[in-house]
Image (cartoon, rainbow, N blue to C red):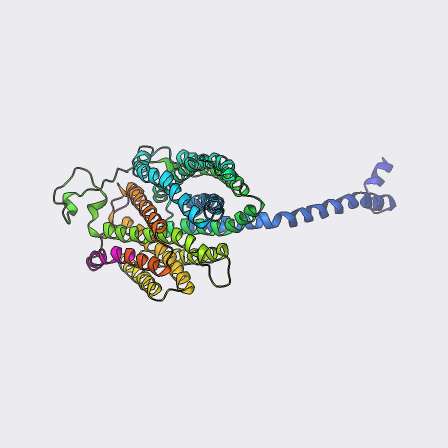
Amino acid sequence: MNVVATARSPQGTSGTGGVKGNNRRGGPGRTGGLFRSVGRALHFPVTGTARGIRKATHAHGAGESGLGKLIELHGVNGAGDVMITIALASTVFFAVPTDEARGRVALYLAITMAPFTLLAPVIGPLLDRLPHGRRAAMAGAMLARALLALVLSGAVINGSIEMYPAALGVLVASKAYGVVRSAVVPRLLPPRFSLVKANSRVTLGGLLATGVAAPIGAGLQALGPRWPLYGAFVIFVAGTFLSFSLPHKVDSAKGEDTALLAADEAHLHGPHRKPVKRPGLRTVGIAVTHALGVNAAIRCLAGFLIFFLAFLLREHPLTGQSAAVSLGMVAVAAGVGNALGTAVGAWLKARAPELIIVTVVAVELAVAVTAALFFSAFLVACLAAVAGFAQALAKLSLDALIQRDVPELVRTSAFARSETLLQMSWVLGGAIGIALPLNGTLGMTVAAVVLAAGWLTTVRGLLTSARQGGRPRPRVA
């Protein structure tokens, strides 16, 4: 007992044996603490970045409503899409001589874009019939692109015909995801959040992810044309699982209906004098339809600039730069303008969206006319930046008008149909860009004409709507 008591006494623990015991325990303890410190230091760039992203995407109630997870999912979508774009762009634009490349891109548009244009109007109504499977639809779109990226990884090596149907599948899956995302956003609005602000945050998340993934994709491209597609496969697989992390209310269809391109007796305008049984996209009067028209002109211009400048800058690159660097600089200018427009849209919220559209498109038209009169590399870069800014801000303003004027019963369906029209406009612009001769002045003149046609035919209606004001619609519980 005395021995035991002595061993347990404070003196015993502070004796020689106690010191040795502490040393035996302290040595491994310090080593373990060192390993833990090193492990935390190595993990911090990853965990710290992840916590920072989560904090930003979940701010202002977005975490509680589920909007934050949608922002992260859209970032994954943007990162995967840019990987595929890098792989296809390098194959289509820079792997063959210019004349042959234009022919191959024209074939690409004919085989992929034309069927896609026919399929696009079907996607929206089809997804309208799946209101209880939106998470599964987004996951399916992600998984389809993951598998198609593997198919493309083999096709880009030898340029086989498999590349075209696979690219068509990627476009269709991407469109399906975009339509469902537009339908999901209203279900995830945090308190006191406008739809335009929510859309701007989702879009900005996608742009930031695209900006991060683009240099990674370029680095993978340096290893070989397959590697960006392998990266896209991994990203889209992650997106497949992330889709199911969205709240269950995403699959709710409570209070929704289908939007048709028709008018009802409460909102007759133009040639639509006869009422129809169901409300539709034109039931709101002139604001949404004119805003959609001018946005279609902007999107047509965007498609035109992408394809026209891709070939023009290859033959006539910016002073002192290679073709790839020249196109990259213009793309960065457009991306910066788009991100800035998205940020400004979030700040402006829904203030006078008609006036915002009229103003930004007028500025873009002025820059396009200037570029046509005094063509130069600097003005081309300026037009790309202003076009990106105007496209983002005009689209957010269109969203605000749909939020304000379209009854919530048909709002999500209206988003689906507007997105379809904008995509078809982009296809048309791309076709014009391929068909034109590689003359900078001629190209900028065509760009100005396209934009002027959209602006002049809609400005009066938008200003009239701005003077009359819009009636906000009550929310559906």
Residue 330 position within the rendered picture, expressed as x and y whole percent measured from the top left: 44, 58
Quadrant location of the C terminus in the rendered image: top left
On the rendered image, what quadrant is the N terminus found in?
A: top right
Q: Residue furthest left?
A: 273
Residue 463 figure quarter: bottom left
Instruction: Locate residue 30, reporting x and y percent.
Output: 75, 47
What residue sits 79% from the left and 43% below the top? 25
Determine if the magenta segment contains residue 463.
yes
Q: Is residue 194 visible?
A: no
Q: Nearer the viewer, residue 93 or 152?
A: 93
Question: Residue 295: image x %, image y %?
Answer: 30, 52
Q: Nearer the viewer, residue 400 or 193?
A: 400
In the rendering, at what x and y percent does residue 405 appear?
24, 49
Q: Is residue 320 above or below residue 166?
A: below
> Could you tell whether 26 is left or right of 450 in the image?
right
Magenta region: 451-475
Q: Nearer the viewer, residue 429 or 349?
A: 429
Drawn side of residue 183 relative to residue 213, left or right? left
Q: Quadrant of residue 362?
A: bottom left
